[in-house]
Each structure stands twice: as C-alpha cells, then as structure tokens.
Image (spheres, rainbow, N blue to C red):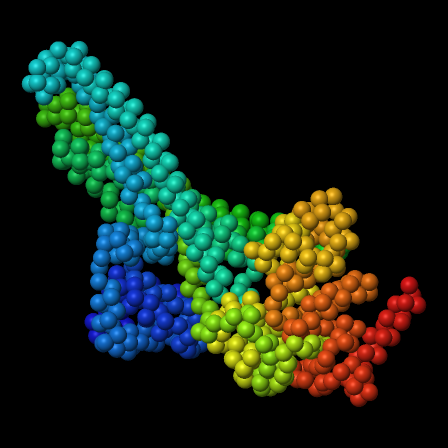
Amino acid sequence: MAAFRSHSNGLILRSALPGRARWDMPALFRKPLLAEALQDALVGLPGFLRVRVASVTGRVLVYYDQTQLTLTQAGTVIADTFAGLGKNIVKTLLDRDTSAPGDGTVGPTTRIHQLLGRTFDADLVELIAAAEREAETTFYKPLANSTGHTALRVFNPLAIGLMMSVALSGGFPPLAALGLTSKYAQMAVFGGTFLLGKTLESVLEDRKSSSWNDYAVMVEQALRLKTFRHLHSLDMGTLSEHSSDQLMNFFHGDIAKIRGFLQYTPPTMWDKALNIIAGGTIMMVVSPIALLLALIPLPLLVQLSKKHQAEAGENFEKVAAEIEDLNRVLSANMGGMATVKSFAAEAREIASLQALAQQLRESESVAAHENSRFNALSTYTLTMGICMPLVYSCFALMSGSMSMVGFLIQTSMIPVVLTSATGLEQANYQYQDAKYAAKRLHALLALQAKIHDGHRALEARGIGGELVFENVTFGYDDTPVLRDISLTIPANQTYAVVGTTGSGKSTLIKLLQRFYDVDGGRITLDGVDLRELHLKNLREAVGLVSQDTYLFNATIYENVLYGRPDATREEVLAACEAAEMASFVAEEPLGYDTVIGERGQRLSGGQRQRISIARTILKNPPIFILDEATSAVDNKTEAAIQRSVNRIAANRTTIIIAHRLSSVIHADQINVLEEGRFVESGSHDALLARDGVYAHLWRLQTEARQLESEVG
C-alpha cells in the first residue's frame, strides 16, 4: 500500500476490479478545483481510459488498460501526478476552495454526502449530490417530514399503551400529580391525544410522500439533463462505441431506477431506523437489560450483511447486463421488423428472444433468492432480538421488578420495532438496482471528449469559403482511410469527390465538420486550422444533405424550420419552394402541417431529401455539402434535387460526394478518390478524355443505365 502514497496526499486503495480501481485521497475532499486539476492532468495519460475525481467523497475512480498498467503502477502515477501539480498550483487551488456555505460544493450538505458516500455506494451518492446542486434542492424537507411522521408513529402506540395501563392499573401517576386523578379523565386525555396524533400522522404522511416524490423527480430531471448535456459534449468517435439502445437505456433504465430508489428506499429506511432508535430508547428507559438482550444478535446481522453485499453485487450486475442485451434485441426487432418479415425469420427471432428471456429469468431468480434468503435470515435474527427482551419482561412483571405501566409501554414498542426490523426486501432490491445503475452512469460521465473546442470565433457572414486539405492522414483505430491527401477548394466553387465504396469519401466530410480530428496534416478554412475554430461556429457554417437524412417525428414545416428556428413562415415556405417540395406537400391533407412519422417514414426517399435540402437552404450556410444525396432516388427525383442543388450552390463553396457520376458532371472540378488517395482531378470532359479511373466508372454506370432502360 505504500506504493500508493505520496507525501501527505494519503492515496489509499479502496476497491479494485480488473481494469477498474477506486482510491481515497483525503487531500481532495471538499476541494473541487483541485479535483478538477488532477482529473485534467490524468486524462490522456498512457493507459488511462477514463478518470473521475470527486471532491464530494475525496475519491479517484480510474479505468485503465491492463496491457499498459498494473494496479500498482496506476496508483503510483496518480500519486506522482498529484505531487507534480506543483506547490504553487496546489496552494492556489486550496485557497480558492476555501469552505463557504452555500457555494454548492461545501458546507453541511457536502459533509452529509461525504458521510453517506463512505457508508453506502460512493458512485450513487456522488451522482445524487451532483444532481442536487444542479437542481438546487436538498433532501432536508422530505427528511424533516419523515422524521415528524415517524415520531408520531412511535408516539401513537405509546398513547394506546398508556391508556391501557390506566385501565388495568390504578392510573397514571404523572397525570394524577397534575390533578387528573380520575381514571376516566386520564383515559380521555390519552384517547384524545391518540386521536390528535393519528390526525397529524395522516397529514404528515401525505406531506412526506409528496416531498420525497418531488425530490426524486427533481434529481431525476437534473440527472437526465446532466447526462444529455454530457452526451452532446462527446465526439462522434466516442459515441460510436455505444449503440443507440445503450444510450437510451441510461435515460429509460438507469436514471429511472435512481428515481425509484429515492422515492422508496431513503424514506423507508429512515422511518425504520427512527422507529428502531425511538423504540429502543424507550425500551432502554424502561429496562436497560431488555435492550442489551435485544442487541445480542447485532454482530451476526453485520456479518450477514457483509456477505450479502458481496454476493448480491455480482448477481445484480449480471442481471443489469442481461436486461441490456434483451432490450437491444427488442429494439433491433422493432426497428427492423420489415427485414425480419422479408426473411421469414419471425420464428428465429422469437426463439432468440426466448433464450435471452430464459437466461434473464434464471439470473433474476438467483438474485431474488439471494435477496430473499438474506432478508429472511436478517428478519429472523432481528425477531430473536425482540423475543428475548419480551420474555425477560414477562418474568420481570411476574416477579414484581417491572410495573404494569412499564410492561405495557415496552409491549407497545415491540410491534413498532419488530415491524421496522422486517420488510427490507424491496428497499434492499432497489438499492442494489440503483447502485449498479449509478455505476454505469458514472462510467458514461467519466468519458472524455477527444474533440476539443477551438478558441477563435467565426462569423458566418465573414467567411470566404476556401477549404484546404494539407497532407491529411486519417484512420479509424488501426485501419487507415486517408493517406496524405491534399486538395484546395476555392471559395464559391463546386468540387466533387467520387470513388468506389470504402474509398474514404464520406470520411472527408466527417473531418470537415470535426466529428473526428485528422491524424496528420491539417484542414483549413480561409487559412485557419479547423482545430482553432469554435465548433459551434464551424458547424453553423456548414450545411449538409446526406444520404441518410434524419427527420424528426414532427410536421413538414417544423422539420424545415429546424434549419433556422428564428425564421419567419415566409422564409420557410420560400426555402420549401426552392427545394421543389410543393408537388408532394399539396398531396398531403394537412399540407405543411402533416406529421411525417419517426425518421420521416411516411415519405419517400426523394421527399425526405427535398425536406433536408429546404432545411439547408433556410440555414443559408457559406459551405454546402451533398453527401450521396441522390444515390437512392429515381432519375426524375434526381433531376429535381439537382435543380435545387444548383440554386444552393450559387455563390457558395459546394462539395458533392457521389457514387452516381451523373450528379457531378457540372462540377468545376471532379476529384477521384481511390484507396484513400486522390488519383485524378479535372472536369468531366477532361477526365473522360484521360481514359483513367473516372472514365472506367463512367462507362460502367452508363452501361448499367442502358441495361436498365432496355429491361424497363
């Protein structure tokens, strides 16, 4: 463990799994700026895949590559990096992190969260604490309502016990000392007190439920927005590592589980804890020996809990993974229903789903059995802790060492304590569920964007539009795609890039929009490296119409308006007219107010493309890109799209990515991309005269069109 310590930072290993480890670092506690500095310093170091440094709990969570680092090496790097931040930097950060109540990161709330983080799952506590700060809420109000409600739940049975003691004995001496000597008067006092207590209990029960629900919903909303913002901050390369189903599961599955946990488990466990404490305290006042007897099973209960946490953790993690697999198959089938039917594969898909469902059922059964076994054993153990003092109290009453009042008070407390000591199954199940949901969310939020924003602002009106690719090299992982390519696209010119499938055409567009960064060389806009520009400015300057046009489940008008939300209706309709949409819009009963379905499924491919073109016309970008937009439409639709493109291309830089060569014959220059390199450049006529790659592709496509015409 000494290898994990550096000076006074006290880096202490807390938990470790293959490729994942968490350390305690007290020097980071309540120092968010220092934690941020350490996280920034660790991100990108060799072998470190994901890093999360939390000032709330004073912990460092690291996912590392086991082929590059051992656990000991990872800890040493963290300690050395912290020490290497420099005394002046550390002092500055420490000074800026001085505790100040109300700053959202320190003060009582954070101290409570820090304590909770050491008692329960740190990932879960940290997520909830971050959501509280974002939602500007705390659990104080629901906790206060729970406390009041629980106090009355303890007091009301006590009032019943006292009323019974009055009926069975000579009265209640404290009330007699106040002048209420009549047993009937004393019973009336306790009866009225009980009625008032039950009334207040009902009121507080409603407030308790409402306040916990409001708190849980606010935390859920904050987590949802935090996760949504984080996803949008990530680059396409990082996002491509997760399927859309996995990403949706964070919102519909994991965050919802945390909300359900907050709605049920904290109020339930708090109520039970207070009941046990209050009931136990009253029992101690009546008979300390009885309380000591009740505590005898406690060590056994602690051991049972430790064993259960270890076994339940593995079970719930397995269940969560299998639920994700099942949801992925369901989503794929719902989205690909036409493909399944076209291959008559219904039986095959049903069998596959049944196998996954059976596997999930077995895993859930194992998890539920382990949970039930633990709860049964813990309930039995706690019941023994209740029975022993009860037996003792009976003997004490018979021997005269305990009064009837004391016996009845203790007897009235036993159901309160016993009820609170049972029924933990649902609370524990939801805690385990939420714990592993938080673990997955933590891993997602620890992902770091590989594409970083530039520092230079860009005004769309001031853009000339000259694009230059200078010795650009790029590949996906270990697969090279572009090999040292260079190309200059003058402002307000139309350049085309053609080539066979897989030659790297669409990759050029992804690099131009900085969905990815080049591995070598650079791309400039008006002489400025794209990496220096603000991403928002760059992407606002580019209008893209792609083969796979994404349309929202909204009206035609709203989909076009997405290009520039502040546009007037007249501007939207003018863009639609320029995109030649009038013919098919007129056929819709509601015209532009027609809802087109998810991804525009109610429209043809050509109609979707024209909406995309109208959206780009409305955006009015200085750079226009057409990426395989006519590859899946008929000749008539291609002609209509081409006319719209010609209108857009006027007085702006235009790049046409195409497999169908008929769509690029009027380009100022056609560039042929082959295996990641430009092999030919020139006009349509010049390239045909050269009789090279382009001419060969042209002949193949011309012959194919002639064959189609003859067959038709």
Q: Position of residue 200 (x, y in %)?
A: 28, 26
Furthest residue toward left: 177
Residue 320 visible in the shown view? no
- In the picture, residue 60 is in which quadrant? bottom left
Viewed as shown, does residue 457 lie left or right of 699? left
Taking depth in this image into account, of 33 and 566 the one nearest to the observer is 566
Taking depth in this image into account, of 151 and 634 the one nearest to the observer is 634
Vertical position of residue 662 compared to residue 291: above or below: below
Vertical position of residue 101 compared to residue 488: above or below: above
Q: Position of residue 659 (x, y in %)?
A: 74, 73
- In the picture, residue 630 is in which quadrant? bottom right
Task: Locate the C terminus and report the quarter of the image it occupies.
Answer: bottom right
Taking depth in this image into account, of 58 and 710 the one nearest to the observer is 710
Task: Locate the N terminus and report the quarter of the image it occupies.
Answer: bottom left
- Residue in the picture at 31% in, 76% down: 81
Count how many numbered circles sit on residues in the image. 0
- Residue in the picture at 84% in, 79% down: 699
Q: Position of residue 522 (x, y in %)?
A: 54, 82
- Residue in the picture at 20% in, 14% down: 188
- Residue in the picture at 24% in, 32% down: 151
Vertical position of residue 275 compared to residue 186: above or below: below
